[in-house]
Structure formats: structure tokens, C-alpha cells
């Protein structure tokens, strides 16, 4: 492999194709993300942003191409060949390096906040209950919800739910965190509290963070790099300054003009 | 009074069996393995598409030939359990489908195993909404217990018939049977409603 590149890439996708029936979602997509970078994916709905996150989280497979996470091959399919049966153990090992926060929170409604956060560390990482609860409290403190330890998801506001979602994902110690439109279901005010947690996190951690968002200002502040996608391909990418101040592509300009006018 | 005990015991044991087997069919029907799926589907369709009475007779006369020696009561419980497990499998399935896909995805993202996900995440959410349906099947099974009289189980109806044959008085014992069934069914219905209020939000 590239000998001049000493760092193992956090995420590498090569010629990835993915379609649902006749609908092509990703078209020969190439994407490389360096470790500990904060990257925002922007673009119109249906451009394939969320699909990228779902593939990296192993919630979706791909039709062809190659996906590597931290240097380990997750998928490597040639076009026309049926995907080889994947060894669950192997996928599970890769999955353990990735965490995801969902648009619809997906908290476990029958479990307290504490148990939402400790369930996987206890059963997957084999932490003792005391240790897992101790750590859960630290993460809850970090997202400003220490007083909600024993609450149930139904008793929380949307913003609080999403902050628990972040704490829950962090408790699994992922190297890569994926955020899938995590404020889209929230009022602006509640979105703001979630985004402030996210900015703090981005500043203080060396995790690789990949964020799909429609909030351009936040993307601008948060990320080292912005990727603009349309119709399943990357149209343009660059630093926030480049993309927002002097986009090269006409399509990027049109998109930014539309969304920035709308807000 | 023995007859009442037998009727209730047959219902409770039959329901316990149906609850366990029904879950087994529901889980195996979710399997990706084609043989397992096909087998579970065939079993469920078979028990749902043939009459309970036929199944009772079948088990009663065929099991001993196959080397299984069961008492008539045990055979009856087995028949009730198998028959109703097929219906409960569908009830479980509805409950499992009512849990949003996002719950499976969140569990997967946390790397929880499939078994753990099912046991600790999905099932606790799938059960409360199906409690009323399960309760209805419990009552239905209770009312089906007189069929066991066909294989000489001395449950309520059979006992009433015997008393009638001995005393030439059918009205009193049969009325009593009707009243007992009515009373117990109403009590069960109230209990189901109580559980419903408690677990279904």
C-alpha cells in the first residue's frame, strides 16, 4: 500500500456501489478519512450521505467495491460476484471500533438512562456493573445529564434523549463516531444543546468523527473538512473556508445558496 | 371438584406449553436458515389448519404406537399446547414486528449479540402489546378443554355427563358446568384487562 502514508486511514471506501432495486444510492464512491479528523457530509436529501454512515456501521452491505475501517477490510466485493458470506466474528470486531448516533435516537424505552448506557459495556466489553455505571456517570456528566440517571427515555426531551444517545455510543469507546442527522428531529433550541455537546466533544477527543447534517453553520464550525455530495457521488470537498467561501463547483454553489437562504 | 381442577390444570399447563412453543416457532420463523424456516412454517400452518379435535384424537391414538406412553391428561395438555402454540406464534410475530427497526439497529451499533438483542431489547418491548391477545387465547383454550373428554379426560363436561348418566338428571350438572365456565372466563377476562392496563401504555 502507499508507503508514504504512515497513518492507517480511519475510513477508506473505494469504488463503492450501492442501490436499492433500481435506485442507485452510491455510484463508484471513493472516500478517505484520516484518523481523528472531523468531517461533515452535506448535500441534498437522497444524495447518499446517510447510506455511507449505515454502511460503515454495518447496517447495510454494499453491491460492489471495497470498504476498510482502521486498515481492516470490512467489504471487498467485485461487481457481478455475489457477496461472500461474511464471518460475523470479523464484522463484529470491526463494528466494535465504530459508534453511531441516530436521527431518531433509538434509545431502549424499557430501560433507564443508566441501563441504556451500561447495557452494551457490561455485555459486550465485559465491564463489571460498578465499573460500567461509574463510566456511565462520567459520560452523563459530560453531556450535562447527571441528574437524569434513573429517568426513562419517555421522561426526557428530544434534546436530552439525543444527549443520552451520544453518551451511550461513547461508552463503547469507539475510534470512529458517526452522527446521522442527529438534530433533524429537534426544535432549534434543543438542537443547539445537542450541537454544543458535540462541539465540546469534537474539541476534546481524538476520535474520528463523521457527521451528516443539514445545519451548515454547525458543519462549518465543527469540521476540518466538508464533503458535498449529490446523486451518490462526491461533487466537491475541502476545508470549510473553501467550500463555504469559494466553492469551485456550480452545483455546490447552488446548493449552499438554497440552504443558506432558507435558514 | 376434581373435574374443575383438571380443567384448570389442563388450561394452565397447555397455555404454558403454548407460550414456550409459540415463541420457539416465532423465533425460528425469523431464521435465515431455509430448512429451519420451512420447518417452523410448516408446523405452524399444520396446527392452524387442522381441527383441534382431530389433533387430540391423533395424538391419543398415534403416540402410543410411536412408543410414547402418556396419560390421557398429558396427551390433552400436549394437544392444547401444540394447537395454541401455532396461534401464539402469530401473536408473537405481530409483537416482534411492532418493535421499530431502529431498536435492532441501535443494538447492532452497540455490538450486542443477536441473542442478547432479542432477549433484552426486542422481547421486553414486544410482549406488553400482545398481552391482551394472549389472554384471549388463554380464555379460548379454557373453553376448548371439554374436547379432552373425547379422550377420556375427566374434565368438567365429561364429569357432568357421567353424573347425568348415573342420576338421569342432566339439567343440573350441565347448568353447573355452564355457570362454572362462565364464572371462570369472566374472572380471566378481568385479569387480562388488569394486565392490559398495567403493561400497555
Image (cartoon, coloured by chain):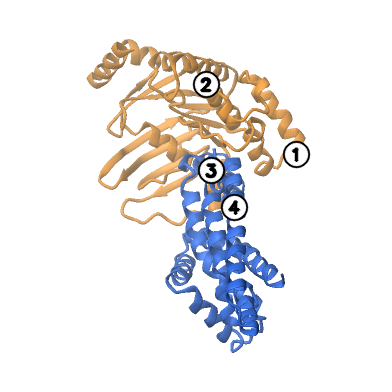
Chain colours: A orange, B blue
SS class, disc 2: helix
Q: Which is more N-terminal, label 4 or label 3? A: 3
Q: Relative to the observer, which residue lies in front, A8 or A104?
A: A104
Tell me the chain of label 1: A
Q: Quadrant of the C terminus of chain A?
A: top left
**Residue A131 sits above or below residue A74 on the image:** above
Please tell me whether mark 4 or mark 1 is closer to you in this view: 4
Query: Mark 2 highlights which residue?
Result: A159
Please tell me whether mark 2 or mark 3 is closer to you in this view: 2
Determine if residue B31 is in view.
no
What distance separates the C-alpha of mark 3 from that of mark 4? Answer: 11 Å
Label 2, residues with CA under 10 Å away: few <14, some 14-19, many ≥20: many
Q: At which x and y percent is residue B105?
A: 49, 41
Label 3, residues with CA under 10 Å away: few <14, some 14-19, many ≥20: many
Label of residue B108 in the image: 3
- Do pointers 2 and 3 mark residues of a single chain? no
Q: Quadrant of residue A227?
A: top left
Query: Mark 1 highlights which residue?
Result: A128
What distance separates the C-alpha of mark 4 from that of mark 1? Answer: 20 Å
Q: Quadrant of residue B50?
A: bottom left
Label of residue A59 in the image: none
Tell me the chain of label 4: B
**CB atoms of marks 2 and 3 within 8 Å:** no
SS class, disc 4: helix
Q: Is residue A103 left or right of residue A123?
A: left
Q: Is residue A95 left or right of residue A181?
A: right
Amino acid at each position: 500500500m502507499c508507503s508514504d502514508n504512515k497513518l492507517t486511514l480511519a475510513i477508506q471506501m473505494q469504488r463503492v456501489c450501492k442501490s436499492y432495486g433500481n435506485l442507485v444510492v452510491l455510484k463508484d464512491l471513493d472516500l478517505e478519512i484520516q484518523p481523528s479528523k472531523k468531517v461533515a457530509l452535506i448535500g441534498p436529501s437522497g444524495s447518499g450521505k446517510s447510506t455511507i454512515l449505515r454502511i460503515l456501521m454495518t447496517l447495510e452491505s454494499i453491491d460492489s467495491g471495497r470498504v476498510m475501517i482502521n486498515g481492516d477490510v470490512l467489504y471487498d466485493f467485485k461487481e457481478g460476484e455475489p457477496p461472500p458470506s461474511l464471518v460475523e466474528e470479523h464484522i463484529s470486531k470491526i463494528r466494535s471500533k465504530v459508534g453511531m448516533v441516530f436521527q431518531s435516537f433509538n434509545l431502549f424505552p424499557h430501560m433507564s438512562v443508566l441501563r441504556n448506557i451500561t447495557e452494551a459495556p457490561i455485555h459486550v466489553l465485559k465491564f463489571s456493573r460498578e465499573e460500567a455505571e461509574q463510566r456511565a456517570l462520567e459520560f452523563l456528566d459530560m453531556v450535562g445529564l447527571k441528574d437524569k440517571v434513573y429517568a426513562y427515555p419517555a421522561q426526557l426531551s428530544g434534546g436530552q434523549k439525543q444527549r443520552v444517545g451520544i453518551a451511550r455510543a461513547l461508552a463503547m469507546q469507539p475510534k470512529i463516531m458517526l452522527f446521522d442527522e442527529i438534530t433533524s428531529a429537534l426544535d432549534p433550541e434543543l438542537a443547539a444543546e445537542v450541537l454544543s455537546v458535540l462541539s465540546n466533544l469534537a474539541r476534546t477527543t481524538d476520535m474520528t468523527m463523521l457527521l451528516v447534517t443539514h445545519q451548515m453553520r454547525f458543519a462549518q464550525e465543527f469540521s476540518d473538512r466538508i464533503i458535498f455530495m449529490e446523486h451518490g457521488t462526491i461533487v466537491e470537498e475541502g476545508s470549510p473556508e473553501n467550500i463555504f467561501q469559494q466553492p469551485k463547483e456550480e452545483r455546490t454553489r447552488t446548493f449552499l445558496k438554497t440552504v443558506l437562504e432558507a435558514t | 371438584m376434581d373435574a374443575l381442577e383438571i380443567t384448570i390444570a389442563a388450561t394452565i399447563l397447555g397455555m404454558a406449553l403454548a407460550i414456550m412453543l409459540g415463541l420457539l416457532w416465532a423465533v425460528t420463523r425469523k431464521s435465515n436458515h431455509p430448512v429451519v424456516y420451512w420447518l417452523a412454517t410448516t408446523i405452524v400452518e399444520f396446527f392452524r389448519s387442522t381441527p383441534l379435535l382431530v389433533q387430540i384424537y391423533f395424538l391419543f391414538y398415534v403416540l402410543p404406537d410411536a412408543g410414547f406412553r402418556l396419560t390421557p391428561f398429558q396427551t390433552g395438555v400436549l394437544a392444547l399446547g401444540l394447537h395454541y402454540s401455532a396461534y401464539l406464534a402469530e401473536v408473537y410475530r405481530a409483537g416482534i414486528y411492532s418493535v421499530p427497526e431502529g431498536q435492532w439497529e441501535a443494538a447492532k451499533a452497540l455490538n450486542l449479540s443477536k441473542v442478547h438483542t432479542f432477549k433484552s431489547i426486542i422481547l421486553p418491548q414486544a410482549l406488553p402489546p400482545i398481552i391482551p391477545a394472549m389472554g384471549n387465547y388463554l380464555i379460548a383454550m379454557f373453553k376448548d378443554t371439554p374436547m379432552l373428554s373425547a379422550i377420556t379426560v375427566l374434565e368438567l363436561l365429561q364429569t357432568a355427563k357421567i353424573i347425568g348418566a348415573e342420576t338421569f338428571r342432566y339439567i343440573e350438572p350441565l347448568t353447573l358446568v355452564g355457570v362454572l365456565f362462565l364464572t371462570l372466563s369472566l374472572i380471566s377476562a378481568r385479569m387480562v384487562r388488569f394486565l392490559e392496563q398495567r403493561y400497555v401504555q
